[in-house]
């Protein structure tokens, strides 16, 4: 269901996820909406200097979960009001396009349901050769050799010029076409749109984000804080601040996104929230989105500790021990962590394996005390 922003919460009866923009208008909600707030997951919301629905949001964070903020600006505004919140980044970082197929000959997308026996896997990186440029704001920041490359494909994310874009399914179709193009062809994506860069990064594709001296991005003004914190996931080029192009003509390997480890942590946070609702957990497992494929596997840092050992029993499991393991993966995301135990099962710590961290549960000698 797609609802007008002003009635997003009005008389809702089902479960749904909040990944949206909150403007400065008043929003409608009723006592019944407050009573049903456990059905909504406010995971990734951007609000400017004035965030509406403060009473609802404060109640939500006291009863359900902290408020997931899509920008650091929103986080600061809520914390000023002592409302529980955290920077979540954007839910598009969880996109998985396995099974999306593009008909290259006719430049059309072909819907290929991923549960069908003939569903195809996305091509491996070495077979994806195209340089996809989408709504690049400052083209002078990109070398001429890249712009004129025979592998360059220029696309627009502006739905207004797409046939059928005025209809809901036409918009879905165009979004699917863009996503499946990235998934099946892109060696690298160059863009100034966060909602091009984020899903591409989620698929493990290097993203070069081009910023402009004017402070404007295709979706609106950058300096109002709407993308604050999100750009750290990408490679960034902004000539006015000395962040110049360092990627040559893109004929060789493009380094993985500098913020892949950050993105993995954001994805882990989203999954931790979403799996609390069994509809979302069941759907993610049914469509093969879990376990995630960790993005930072290729971001190797040499000269740091790579193996850690914990000796634990079931009675030791609590938030403190889980936080200790999280700290290891925070600072050493590609490490192997061994849990030596007599009675802990892998399922007791499955959140780590679901996000593709290297956690191994090993049986100890039962005679050891």
Image (spheres, rainbow, N blue to C red):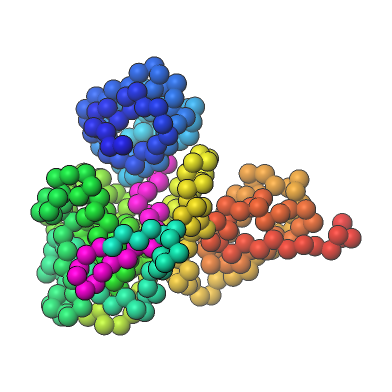
The answer to which of 271 and 324 lies nearer the viewer is: 271
Quadrant of the rendered structure where residue 156 is? bottom left
Q: Is residue 192 above or below residue 187?
A: above
Q: Position of residue 87 (x, y in %)?
A: 39, 45
| Residue depicted at 34% across the width and 79% down the height | 127
The answer to which of 354 and 140 lies nearer the viewer is: 354
- Quadrant for the C terminus in the image: bottom right
Q: Which residues are magenta?
A: 85-109
Quadrant of the rendered structure where residue 214 is? bottom left
Q: Position of residue 353 (x, y in %)?
A: 58, 58
Quadrant of the rendered structure where residue 211 is? bottom left
Q: Position of residue 50 (x, y in %)?
A: 26, 31
Residue 109 falls left or right of residue 147: right
| Residue depicted at 16% across the width and 68% down the height | 154
Q: Position of residue 269 (x, y in %)?
A: 47, 48
Residue 273 falls left or right of residue 167: right
Q: Is residue 194 visible?
A: no
| Residue depicted at 44% across the width and 70% down the height | 299
């Amino acid at each position: 269901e797609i609802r007008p922003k002003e009635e997003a919460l009005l008389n809702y009866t089902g479960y749904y996820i909040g990944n949206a923009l909150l403007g400065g208008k008043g929003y409608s909600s009723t006592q019944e909406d407050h009573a049903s707030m456990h059905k909504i997951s406010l995971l990734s919301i951007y609000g400017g200097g004035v965030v509406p629905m403060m009473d609802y949001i404060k109640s939500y964070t006291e009863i359900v979960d902290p408020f997931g903020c899509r920008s650091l600006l929103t986080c600061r505004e809520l914390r000023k009001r002592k409302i529980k919140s955290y920077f979540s980044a954007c839910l598009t970082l969880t996109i998985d396009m396995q099974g999306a197929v593009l008909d290259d000959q006719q430049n059309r997308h072909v819907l290929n349901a991923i549960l069908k026996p003939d569903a195809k896997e996305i091509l491996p990186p070495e077979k994806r050769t195209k340089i996809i440029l989408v709504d690049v704001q400052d083209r002078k920041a990109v070398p001429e050799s890249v712009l004129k490359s025979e592998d360059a494909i220029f696309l627009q994310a502006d739905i207004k010029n797409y046939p059928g874009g005025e209809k809901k399914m036409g918009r879905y179709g165009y979004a699917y076409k863009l996503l499946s193009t990235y998934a099946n062809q892109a060696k690298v994506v160059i863009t100034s749109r966060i909602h091009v860069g984020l899903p591409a990064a989620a698929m493990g594709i290097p993203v070069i984000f081009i910023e402009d001296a004017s402070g404007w991005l295709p979706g609106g003004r950058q300096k109002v804080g709407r993308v604050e914190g999100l750009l750290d996931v990408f490679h960034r080029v902004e000539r006015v601040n000395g962040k110049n192009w360092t990627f040559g003509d893109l004929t060789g390997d493009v380094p993985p996104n500098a913020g892949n480890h950050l993105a993995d942590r954001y994805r882990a946070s989203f999954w931790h929230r979403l799996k609390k609702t069994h509809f979302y957990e069941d759907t993610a497992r049914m469509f093969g989105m879990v376990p995630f494929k960790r993005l930072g596997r290729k971001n190797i840092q040499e000269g740091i500790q790579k193996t850690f050992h914990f000796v634990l029993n079931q009675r030791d499991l609590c938030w403190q021990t889980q936080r200790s393991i999280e700290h290891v993966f925070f600072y050493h995301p590609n490490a192997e962590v061994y849990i030596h135990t007599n009675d802990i099962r892998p399922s007791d710590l499955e959140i780590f394996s679901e996000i593709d961290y290297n956690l191994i549960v090993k049986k100890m000698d039962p005679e050891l005390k």
